[in-house]
């Protein structure tokens, strides 16, 4: 029994090195990661610029209307063209990166923590607690996530914070299920019994032993979940139920696209490609991570 | 088998009660007094108080919820704040359109996704396989409503093949106006189904019973469709069922892009006018629809996989 | 005695990411009509590759059949079109796979799976095919009422009997049984083997029995070949191999199983492991584990040498280039 724990701790470094090696060999996944890191850097630098310049660049280039340039086609001056208020789509997209990205990441973080907590308790204690928690999760799963998000926004009102909640809440059951299953598969292993035998407390067993071993599927699901969250955010903003204008979220840039689709194709095409590439990079990264963590799953 | 169906049906009831209760609570949290919304800000306090009693808003949450459920069973979802028309009547007009759209999207996903997945798996690493994998990755990463915009741009405005919005009249007109929205709704799922079918087929191809089938001297086509596909479809059926919820959500977006007269567009309009009974009614109806589709998928699953069926039989005899 | 099946110089390799796996190297065996031929070797020696190769079921890619002939009744199966070989499979040559748990299609009833092969090959009505199916099931002592049940409703031994019924349904001339009892409990093993033997005699079927179990060979086979690292190292009648073994590997195999007649305190396993098939050693493939190995074994590849007209062995000892005494006396 103690053999297994010892073995695990000794091998843990080389295990992660192994994962890293497999991941680096997957070119697409690395591209996904690089693109994603790039987007984060863009988000952070625009936030920094806003702080340093006291929003003057934001006000001047991102939200200020300039009707002379209304619906301008892509050109050297405005490489992505302008929207119906003559605002540069390039600037709006660069400044909008943070909304799509950070709302998605934070929402999934919330869902992971809450779902992980519920799933962890259900899986570890089992019995009645498990039954109650998972039946409630079943109820949540009976509501299509987009429909639930719409209902939440409808009830709470459209704002960035409410958007965050309405993206996070429907995702909770998925994380609860995943964590529950991994906890249940880990908790009966012998090294946990060994820890119990030497009198370790529940808290130590859960956080010290079970959670690290259940981490891999959670990380993968979080990455892929963020991709889905970004799609959902764009969708709600497109419907006018998410980030409110003039804030330049990518989905909200597309809101007016349908109306001007005959005269200004670029408003429809370009922000969509941005969303697509972001989601694609996260999916590639997530798939690569899953294959690297569990090579058995790979075909 | 009929006992299994009844059992599944009974299991659905608590889930549906829970889901509707949750939705009811959310809607109850919405800011603003319904009586004020209906009568306008200038109404006298007495009128507002009277209306509250009339609407039953003075009663506790649980009482109102059970009233709501009681009325729902009778087919009454209340009246719209906006125009005093029965919510049930409005939904009854629009739900078939949404169901038609989601179902057509599913049809696109299955009819395209499964054969593409099969060919990709049979010709793993071929040009076809590689192209399919790239296309499905892109489709899966694209927001459905954006794909709708791209389809409108290409097929309606540039090529003029299909109408860009609304629902045509007559069978041909409906079909013609349904094609672009159905592709829009189904594209993500088609990509998912194609990838799943491929990996599921690749899994099955390696199984020993496929060698057994080959050793029997069967034709490759018989092996593919009779022996591989039926096994490969089992995990796909579950995904397709769960995906129906995504399709319903996607319909909301797609209906807005194409001005499709369905429940989705109705909900979005209702949210904008703070018409709570309409939102609540639509969401509840969509949840019920989704649950019934999942029930149907579960039954189908038991039908396709003999192991599930006998598991149930074994469970029954042991009780 | 007529030779029903003759495999001549069959060489098969697999191309993998880690290199070329030389699974079978220049293998020749022959199965006589009505006889049982045993093929013995360790896991990974190439037994299953040979079985699948005869049926032309080698997965390509990664597999690659380099050279060789498979003569069935004098006809070279390697030269047949895909449509022609399909008429051989299941009808003339049948196969039983190693693991009965995974060899039956889980979503088809066992009756459908047996009937399928009959309908495929025999020119009879569907109804008659099911009559035949029921007969076959009764023959392997499974009540025919159970033909509408699914594989998961049967035990392992019963599944293997279903597979035997399926394999024999078209009355094939040759049955290839790839470790048919390895996955079964010992008590069931004997039962299944006994049944195979009975049916073999009844239908006058020849059997190619692949196994790693020498006890199974002793009880069931007429002729034996011992295969090591994709190469036949010794072959002959059961008597030749059991009473007059010549190859050090064959000796090692016998020394590593318990013998009730002798009071041996310790079993003697063969030292070392089978060589990595992606980089087989030069010379005799067995020299890395052979206690008699000399320079000639490390550099030259031994030829097949006749001991008597049936018994052949691939060893330099038999070619009189290496002597056993060098070691045994030390």
Image: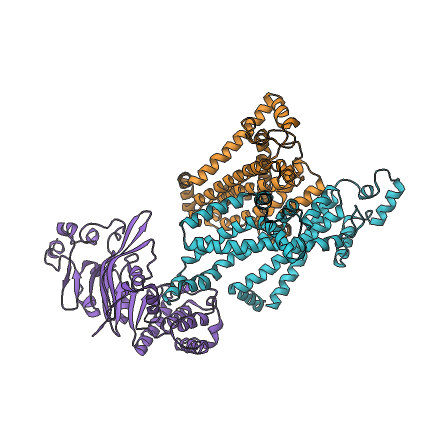
Chain colours: A orange, B cyan, C purple
Nearer to the camera, A163 or B87: B87
Q: Is residue C250 above or below residue A137?
A: below
- Is residue C193 left or right of B141 when viewed as pictured? left
Q: On the image, which quarter does residue C198 sit in?
A: bottom left
Nearer to the camera, B178 or B4: B178
- Is residue A227 left or right of A288 when viewed as pictured? right
Regarding residue A123, the answer to whether it shows in the image is no
The spot of residue B12 in percent (x, y) is: 65, 58
Q: Is residue B247 above or below residue C215?
A: above
The spot of residue B206 in percent (x, y) is: 40, 57
Number of callouts: 0
Q: Is residue C4 above or below residue A237?
A: below
Q: Quadrant of the N terminus of chain C?
A: bottom left
Residue at the image position 60 percent from the left and 65 percent from the top:
B4
Q: On the image, which quarter does residue C117 sit in?
A: bottom left
The spot of residue B274 in percent (x, y) is: 75, 42
Taking the view exactly as shown, the residue that stands out farthest to the top is A53
Regarding residue C156, the answer to whether it shows in the image is yes
The spot of residue B262 in percent (x, y) is: 68, 51
């Amino acid at each position: 029994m103690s053999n297994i724990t010892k073995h695990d701790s000794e091998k843990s470094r080389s295990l992660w090195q192994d994962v890293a090696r497999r991941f680096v060999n997957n070119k697409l996944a690395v591209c996904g990661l690089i693109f994603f890191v790039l987007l984060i850097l863009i988000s952070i630098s625009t936030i920094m610029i806003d702080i340093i310049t006291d929003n003057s660049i934001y006000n001047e280039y991102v939200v200020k209307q300039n009707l002379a340039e209304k619906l301008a086609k892509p050109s050297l001056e405005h490489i992505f063209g302008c929207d119906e208020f003559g605002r540069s789509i390039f600037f709006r997209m660069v400044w909008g990166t943070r909304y799509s990205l950070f709302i998605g990441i934070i929402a999934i973080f919330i869902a992971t923590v809450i779902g992980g907590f519920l799933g962890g308790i259900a899986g570890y204690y089992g019995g009645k607690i498990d039954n109650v928690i998972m039946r409630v999760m079943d109820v949540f799963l009976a509501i299509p996530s987009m429909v639930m998000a719409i209902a939440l926004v409808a009830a709470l009102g459209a704002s960035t914070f409410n958007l965050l909640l309405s993206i996070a809440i429907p995702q909770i059951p998925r994380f609860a299920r995943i964590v529950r299953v991994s906890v249940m598969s880990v908790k009966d292993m012998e090294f946990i019994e060994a820890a119990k035998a030497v009198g370790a407390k529940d808290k130590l067993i859960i956080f010290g032993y079970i959670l690290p071993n259940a981490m891999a599927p959670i990380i993968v699901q979080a990455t892929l979940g963020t991709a889905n969250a970004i799609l959902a955010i764009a969708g709600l903003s497109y419907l006018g139920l998410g980030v409110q204008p003039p804030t330049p979220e990518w989905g909200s840039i597309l809101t007016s696209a349908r109306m001007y689709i005959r005269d200004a194709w670029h408003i429809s095409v370009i922000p969509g490609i941005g969303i697509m590439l972001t989601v694609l990079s996260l999916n590639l990264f997530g798939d690569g991570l899953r294959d690297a963590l569990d090579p058995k799953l790979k075909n | 088998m009929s006992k299994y169906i009844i059992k599944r049906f009974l299991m659905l009831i608590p889930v549906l009660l829970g889901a509707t209760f949750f939705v009811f609570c959310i809607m109850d949290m919405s800011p603003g007094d319904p009586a004020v919304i209906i009568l306008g800000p200038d109404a006298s306090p007495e009128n507002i108080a009277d209306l509250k009693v009339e609407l039953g808003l003075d009663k506790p949450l649980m009482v109102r919820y059970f009233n709501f459920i009681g009325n729902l069973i009778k087919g009454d979802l209340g009246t719209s704040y906006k125009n005093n028309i029965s919510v049930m009547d409005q939904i009854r007009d629009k739900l078939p359109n949404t169901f038609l759209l989601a179902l057509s999207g599913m049809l696109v996903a299955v009819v395209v996704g499964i054969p593409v997945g099969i060919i990709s798996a049979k010709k793993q690493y071929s040009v076809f396989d590689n192209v399919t994998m790239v296309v499905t990755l892109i489709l899966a990463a694209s927001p459905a409503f954006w794909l709708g915009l791209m389809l409108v741009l290409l097929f309606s405005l540039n090529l003029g093949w299909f109408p860009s919005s609304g629902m045509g009249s007559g069978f041909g007109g409906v079909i013609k106006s349904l094609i672009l929205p159905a592709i829009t709704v189904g594209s993500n799922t088609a990509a998912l189904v194609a990838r799943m079918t491929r990996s599921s087929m690749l899994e099955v191809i390696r199984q020993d019973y496929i060698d057994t089938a080959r050793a029997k001297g069967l034709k490759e086509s018989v092996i593919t469709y009779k022996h591989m596909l039926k096994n490969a479809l089992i995990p796909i059926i579950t995904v397709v069922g769960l995906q129906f919820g995504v399709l319903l959500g996607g319909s909301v977006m797609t209906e807005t892009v194409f001005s499709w007269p369905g429940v989705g567009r109705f909900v979005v309009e209702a949210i904008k006018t703070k018409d709570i009974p309409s939102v609540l009614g639509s969401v509840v109806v969509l949840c019920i629809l989704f649950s019934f589709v999942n029930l149907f998928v579960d039954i189908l699953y038991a039908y396709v996989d003999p192991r599930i069926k006998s598991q149930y039989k074994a469970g029954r005899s042991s009780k | 005695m007529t030779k029903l099946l003759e495999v001549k110089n069959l060489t098969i390799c697999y191309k993998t990411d880690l290199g070329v796996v030389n699974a079978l190297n220049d293998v020749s065996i022959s199965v006589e009509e009505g006889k049982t031929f045993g093929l013995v070797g360790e896991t990974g020696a190439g037994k299953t590759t040979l079985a699948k190769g005869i049926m032309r079921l080698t997965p390509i890619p990664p597999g690659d059949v380099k050279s060789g002939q498979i003569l069935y009744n004098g006809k070279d199966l390697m030269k047949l079109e895909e449509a022609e070989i399909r008429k051989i499979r299941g009808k003339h040559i049948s196969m039983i796979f190693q693991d009965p748990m995974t060899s039956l299609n889980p979503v088809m009833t066992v009756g459908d799976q047996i009937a399928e092969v009959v309908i495929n090959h025999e020119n009879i009505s569907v109804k008659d095919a099911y009559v035949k199916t029921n007969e076959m099931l009764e023959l392997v002592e499974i009540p025919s009422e159970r033909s509408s049940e699914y594989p998961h409703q049967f035990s392992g031994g019963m599944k293997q009997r279903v597979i035997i019924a399926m394999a024999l349904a078209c009355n094939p001339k040759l049955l290839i049984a790839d470790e048919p009892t390895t996955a079964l409990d010992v008590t069931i093993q004997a039962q299944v083997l006994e049944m195979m033997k009975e049916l073999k005699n009844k239908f006058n079927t020849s059997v190619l029995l692949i196994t790693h179990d020498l006890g199974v060979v002793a009880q069931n086979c007429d002729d034996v070949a011992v295969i090591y690292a994709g190469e036949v190292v010794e072959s002959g009648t059961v008597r030749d191999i059991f009473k007059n073994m010549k190859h050090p590997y064959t000796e090692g195999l016998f020394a590593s199983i318990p013998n009730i007649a002798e009071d041996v305190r310790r079993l003697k396993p063969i030292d070392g492991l089978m060589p990595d098939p992606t980089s087989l050693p030069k010379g005799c493939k067995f020299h890395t584990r052979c206690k008699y190995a000399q320079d000639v074994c490390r550099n030259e590849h031994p030829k097949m040498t006749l001991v008597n007209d049936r018994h052949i062995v691939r060893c330099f000892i038999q070619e009189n280039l290496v002597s056993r005494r060098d070691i045994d006396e030390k």
